[in-house]
Amino acid sequence: MNVNGNAKGKLEISASPWIMLILAVACGLIVANLYYTQPLVESISSSIGLSSGAAGVIVTLTQIGYGIGLLFIVPLGDLLENRKLVVTLLMLTAVVLIFAAAARNAALFLAASLFIGVGSVAAQILVPYAAHLSPEETRGRNVGNIMSGLLLGIMLARPVSSLVDNYFGWHAIFMMSSAILFVLALVLIKVLPARKPQTSDHYPAILSSMLRLLKTTPILRRRALYHAFLFGMFSLFWTTVPLVLTSPLYHFSSAGVALFALAGVSGAAAAPLAGRFADKGLIRPATGISIVLVILSGLLPIVFAGGSLLSIVILVLAAILLDMGVSANLVLGQRAIFTLGAEVRSRLNGLYMAIFFAGGAIGSAAGGWAYAMGGWKAAMWLGVLFPALALIYFLTERKVERVSK
């Protein structure tokens, strides 16, 4: 299968800025479902009769479902009409969210959590769809704008669910999200242009081709590993920083932690900026900058440790730098792999996301372990190791592997 820029399957029309805004908002609203439960684990587990030792499985199952969807649902974007596929997933996820809100036992809620993760991959069908809608000269900028919306969804999900739980209980966030997804599905089916991939492949062939794509596409492997390392640091930081903020060192309340999380949201502004750099052929230098930003985000809290006001300011700065670096590198990677061929974009995106998502899972687990064993500084030193490895690997990039478009 040719992955060197064949435009087969590309839409004949370009999307307006209004359509791109809708896609950005849609991605944020969809992917937020992966993160709503993270600050609510204690409330949910006590309500459905899940022991504290098993409470973590709530988040884990959602993440497992997302991984399954990336590998088995997202590739359908190269086979089925994209708009109908996304709308179907949204409708099914909206129904599953109602089951989650109504659950009174662990088995039903955990099953719902798994399928919420599967359905949330609709966002990763919309990202390559947006690339199909975009002309070559603005593709990076448009993908960057879409990823800004997705990253805002990730960053805002935790504080929003905490606030909703505080005033209305944990059930309300699932009912609210279900209603939002129903409305979103109706909007998308109305405003998005149809995109039917031009392929004669069948689903088994689509799936079997993914391993071949991974083996024969060095840019995909390299960009996925760069971001796996960076996302490992991202997940480690945001898993452990609430622990240190609520510790006797800082005495933050849950509302204070939510406000701290909001401070990092500004880092998502780096995504469209990175897209513009990519459109100008500056993927390589921008990648180096993004990796260095993530390294700095881990070193600053180590150097300025303690419970002073200055250390809090440094933590906020570190969160912003971290989110900027991760946001930028995510867009740069997608811009690079989306140049490889329109007919395989969904499969490439699914592989890219699945690989770096695994890095995030490792980062979360490693961060919790390091914090328990050695405290905040130990967690940050381990976290810095992830982007440091990315930088070492980045410096080995051969000229033939570089992407200039």
Image (tube, rainbow, N blue to C red):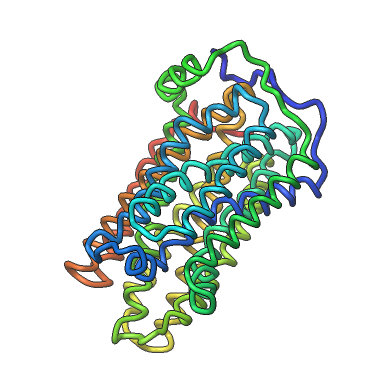
**Is 176 or 391 nearer to us in this picture?**
176
Q: Position of residue 333 (x, y in %)?
A: 53, 40
- The reply, left or right, for residue 199 in relation to residue 61 is right
Residue 314 location, quadrant: bottom left
Q: Residue furthest top?
A: 200
- Residue 155 in view, yes or no: yes
Residue 265 location, quadrant: bottom right
- Residue 387 in view, yes or no: no
Callout count: 0
**Is 144 or 106 nearer to us in this picture?**
106
Q: Position of residue 100 (x, y in %)?
A: 47, 55
Q: Position of residue 149 (x, y in %)?
A: 63, 55
Residue at 47 percent across and 31 percent down: it is 220
- The reply, left or right, for residue 395 in relation to residue 402 is left
* 225, above or below 376, in the image: above
Residue at 45 percent across and 52 percent down: it is 291
**Is 223 or 149 nearer to us in this picture?**
149
* 65, above or below 174, in the image: above
- The reply, left or right, for residue 25 in relation to residue 333 is right
Residue at 54 percent across and 14 percent down: it is 202
Work out which quarter of the rendered image holds the N terminus and state it.
Answer: top right
* 119, above or below 183, in the image: above
Q: Position of residue 195 (x, y in %)?
A: 72, 28
Q: Residue furthest left?
A: 373
Work out which quarter of the rendered image holds the C terminus and state it.
Answer: top right
Residue at 45 percent across and 44 percent down: it is 115
Residue 312 location, quadrant: bottom left
